[in-house]
Image (cartoon, grey):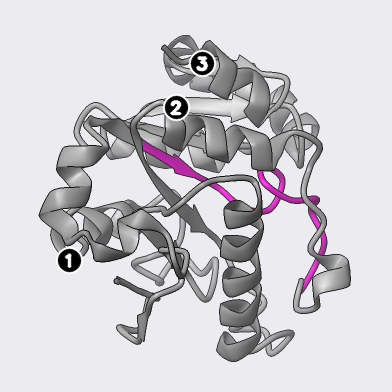
Amino acid sequence: MTFNMWGEESSADIQQGSPDQLLDRSQLNKKYTKPLIAIDRDGVLIECKDAIKTRDRFIPIEGSLAAVSMIRAKGYKLAVIFDQPGISRGELTIDEVEDMNNYMIELFGDVGCPSIDGVLYNMSDSKDDMYAKPKTAMLKRLRDEFRVPIKGGYYVGDRLVDAKMADKANLKPILVKTGKYSEDEKKFNSFANRPLKKKTKVYNNLLDFAESLS
């Protein structure tokens, strides 16, 4: 069982008919013993588009679905943690975001991924929003309310703010060159971000990262 950022229950994180459907949180943690891999959505899993609220606009990046299935098959905990600032701007609704989340989980099931450990998203990118990146509240909620261990885990994003959030949460920052990576590359290479760059590994795409995992 998972929750969105407002505490509404959803079973979207486990495929209907999956063997994982009968497992509780403790059993899932024991089945998937490797560290958490939390993944951004737009730019990592799917192509970046504003206000994605219909299935025709929800376009997976080549190899990304196979990567998700591979990560889970290798025994890693898995979550999708992403931004939806369009909600606060009135560009889309929570119901539309939830519909896209359900579709995402269907696509995961189609490629053999039986479950994930959580889906969390924020509503804005305001500096006053406790869930806005690079603040770590979404990851802490995954740990404290979903009871998914995050220690020793990874966060995979496509922007500098993703790497910053990972580092603040003591996760290993991973960036992929899909999405908006090129827009942030100059800032990422700046002197101020040099310490973060040393901690961050960069891959061409999510599948390259998944294939690098033991």
The residue identified by callout 2 is 173
Badge 3 or badge 2: first in the primary sequence: 2
The residue identified by callout 1 is 145
Report the magenta stretch's main SS. Answer: loop
**Magenta span contains residue 39:** yes
Please indicate, yes or no, whether residue 190 appears anywhere in the rendered image: no
- Mark 3 nearby-residue class (10 Å; few <14, some 14–19, many ≥20): some
Q: Say whether residue 67 is left or right of residue 122.
A: right
Asked if the residue at tag 3 contacts the one at tag 1, i.e. Cβ–Cβ closer than 8 Å, the answer is no
Local SS, label 2: strand
Residue 72, position as x, y percentages in the image: 44, 37
Local SS, label 3: helix
Give the CA distance from mark 3 to mark 2. 9 Å
- Residue 47's tag is none
Q: What stretch is highlighted in magenta?
A: 37-51
Badge 1 or badge 3: first in the primary sequence: 1
Q: Say whether residue 69 is left or right of residue 186.
A: left
Q: In the image, is residue 22 above or below residue 47?
A: below
- Residue 197's tag is 3
Closer to the eye: label 2 or 1: 1
Residue type beneath disc 1: Glu
Residue type beneath disc 3: Lys
Q: Quadrant of the C terminus?
A: top left
